Amino acid sequence: MTKSDTISPLTSQSRSLVEKGQKYFLPNYKPREMILDHGKGARIWDADGNEFIDLGSGIAVCSLGHSDPDLVKALTDQANKLWHTSNIFFTQPPVDLAEQLVEASDFAKRVYFCNSGTEANEAAIKLVRKYAANNGRTADKREIITFTGSFHGRTLAAVTATAQPKYQEGYEPLPGGFTYVAFNDFDAIEKAVSDKTCAIMVEPVQGEGGIVPAHPDFLAHLRKLCDKHDALLVLDEIQCGMERTGHFLAYMGYANAKPDIVTLAKALGCGIPIGAMLVGEKAEDTFQFGSHGSTFGGNPIMCNVALAALKKLRSPAVKQNVTQKSEKIFATLRALGDELGMFEEIRGVGLMIGAALKPQWHGKAGEITELCRQHGVLVLVAGPNVLRFLPPLNITDEELETGMDRVKTALKEYLAQ
Ligand code: PLP
């Protein structure tokens, strides 16, 4: 496929598979009409042989691209040894992974493993309530503050923490005790927090909400308020953590923002389902035997892959690549914005970048990314008005240039329509 080519139409075989999926899946997703088949690095191919540059990494998951040989080896080595034992027994990979996560963070003492982001947040929501209860505040210190535009997952508590009504409608009654405050509003949070607050939960860089970084002083402000009111600071780093911003955890790019809890998932397993809750000293004894659990949490296969991923993601080569490629994407999008006049703002940190569309293109992000796909590049949306770029952290110059050229072609075609 040359750079300006569009992809070929679905073959009848792929079409019938798409139709089967549309018939048998609950319609809570709307997958693009193609069958993705295999990948290598930042490239991914469909079953009809079309090639795509993946600038979305499966929504911030495949941070080392596709089919990374070290991850494949970690997966197959462990698959050939032992798949699952439950948490009634120790195995080596989760023990080593917990140690390495604690060492990589500058606050955590202990780790709880689960299978997804929403479960990590569910664990955090339970833990902060339990922490208050253990301190004799069972009835009057239940409130958890979260922020407008946030996204914390889909379980009932996590979707209640998610301060966006569109995700909550129809699921009432929602669990009580959640309060929403405008993101990055220093005065509003100061007024909202009280001795009834048991935790503040925040994404250092909002992802689904449109790629919106916390103001440089906002996390420190939250830290101070939490200390003043004996509340726990929970950072949801499920999308922005694991080196995506150029820091192991995004808060490490902020001053005085040490959390009590960090939740992780997505790139922790680079494509294998795993979530984690990292807990600092203050709350490390909150969960005791029987307080919480998960059958699959800490599964040795997931943890062995995550160990290999962690080692590679934290390498100087990947860190350097994040900085270099971030600069390139910002520069390309800014130049494209100047040329085409479509963008209001290019924002983000590291390789978590959003191109916010000007008002005349509001609501069009989905159409635009579909046209990108037809030109051989996978780009995400973050809401209806923002194009979201989350490429693999080890994307090469050639992959990125090819991908961004295809984005440019698609945008020009969109404007010419
Ligand atoms: N928190 C954040 C910041 C996320 O971006 C997501 C998913 O997009 C979640 C939580 C939920 O994670 P999962 O889909 O693995 O449950």
Image (tube, rainbow, N blue to C red):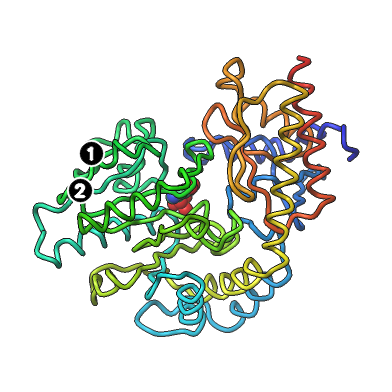
Residue 294 image point, x, y percent: 35, 67
Q: Is residue 91 above or below residue 14?
A: below
Q: Which mark is residue 143?
A: 2
Q: CA distance from mark 2 to mark 1?
A: 14 Å
Residue 290, compared with residue 367, is above or below; it is below
- Image quarter of residue 233: bottom left
Amino acid of disc 1: Lys
Quarter of the figure that contains the N terminus: top right
Residue 67 coordinates in the image, percent (x, y): 72, 62
Q: Residues within 10 Å of mark 2 (few under 14, many from 20)?
A: many
Q: Which residue is mark 1?
A: 191
217 or 296: nearer the eye? 217
**Picture residue at 70% right of the left edge, 40% below the top:** 330
Q: Where's residue 392, x and y in %?
A: 68, 54
Q: Which mark is residue 233?
A: none
Which residue occupies the foreground of this view, 417 or 39? 417
**Secondary structure category for the residue under label 2:** strand
Q: Residues within 10 Å of mark 1 (few under 14, many from 20)?
A: few
Q: Earlier in the sequence, mark 2 or mark 1?
A: 2
Front label number (2 vs 1): 1
Asked if residue 306 is positioned above or below residue 179 in the image, the reply reads below
Point 49% across, 76% down: residue = 103
Q: Position of residue 193 (x, y in %)?
A: 22, 45
Q: Is residue 368 above or below residue 283?
A: above
Which of the two residues, 349 or 312, is positioned nearer the viewer here?
A: 349
Residue 69 left/right relative to 230? right
Quarter the C terminus occupies: top right
Q: Is residue 19 visible?
A: no
- Give left or right: position of 265 versus 345: left
